[in-house]
Amino acid sequence: VQRRAEQAVGRQAAHIVTGSETDAQRLRDWGCPHVMAIPTAYPRRPEPPDQARAERDRLRIIHLGSLETTANRLGLTGYLQQAHQEATAQCAAAAAPLALWVIGDNRQVHPRLAALLAQPNVHQTGFVPDLETVLRPFDVAILPYEHDTGYRTKLPLLLSYAQVVVTTKAAVAGTQPAGLAAACVMVDRVTEFPAVLSQLATRPEERERLGRAAHRFFMRHFTHAAVQPQYAHLWQQVQVAQP
């Protein structure tokens, strides 16, 4: 019933804007007219300075987002169950120990996830209003979700902070401008994360390269200036459609 109602409303709308290409295609398949996918935009951020070198400290794995939301809870649980211990072991064998930093509201954590978080080298910050205080350039940020989650805000945000994003292809299915694969590391399964993380742990120069590529990609695709022409095009379509 809810789907039929959503389809009926969508087909009557003159224009629809969504932040996910996956949602946009679903709406087109329903026969909705004039559907546009416009990504989330953020203010410009300066390029990381030359002295921002992740190799000065041990590898930090970043998980960003409230642990109350389903996608974040299931994604982090899956990573901790399927990948974290193996990644820790591989990095330790390479003499490059890692630490997991969980950034986001953790006031109500599911008991199973809470138990998984209670292990060495896992740091919970809770909600942090100023992400610049916790996101260092060239840290490795994970998006460990094996289904199309509809992530629309997190990927551009992480790229803006020059994070080295390691993600499943499914997690970013809704937001994939051309060239994204050169600005992050995409794999098919969470079980592939340990091999990627252990390689990055011993290659700080590669982390810096990817982090700078991520920032450049953000500047090309996700700043207000980059996205504004798409809204201008939408407004032109709306004006043309007026009786």
Image (cartoon, rainbow, N blue to C red):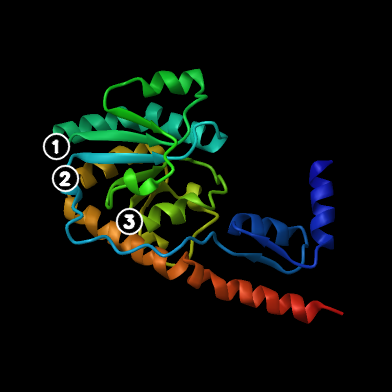
Identity, as a three-letter code, of the amino acid under mark 1: Ala
Image quadrant in which the N terminus is located: top right
Query: Counting residues from the N terminus, which is met first, the one under dot 1 or under dot 3?
Result: 1
Viewer-nearest residue: 1 or 110: 110
Q: Nearer the viewer, residue 131 or 22?
A: 131
Image marks 1 and 2: residues in contact by CB distance under 8 Å? yes
Mark 1 sits on what residue?
A: 94
Residue bearing mark 3: 162
Circle 1 crowding by C-alpha within 10 Å: few under 14, some 14–19, many from 20: few
The residue identified by callout 2 is 202
Q: CA distance from mark 1 to mark 2?
A: 7 Å
Task: Name the residue rendered at 52%, 24% in the picture.
Answer: 108
Above or below, 33 relative to 108: below
Q: Earlier in the sequence, mark 1 or mark 2?
A: 1
Q: Earlier in the sequence, mark 2 or mark 3?
A: 3
Label 2 – label 3 distance at C-alpha: 18 Å
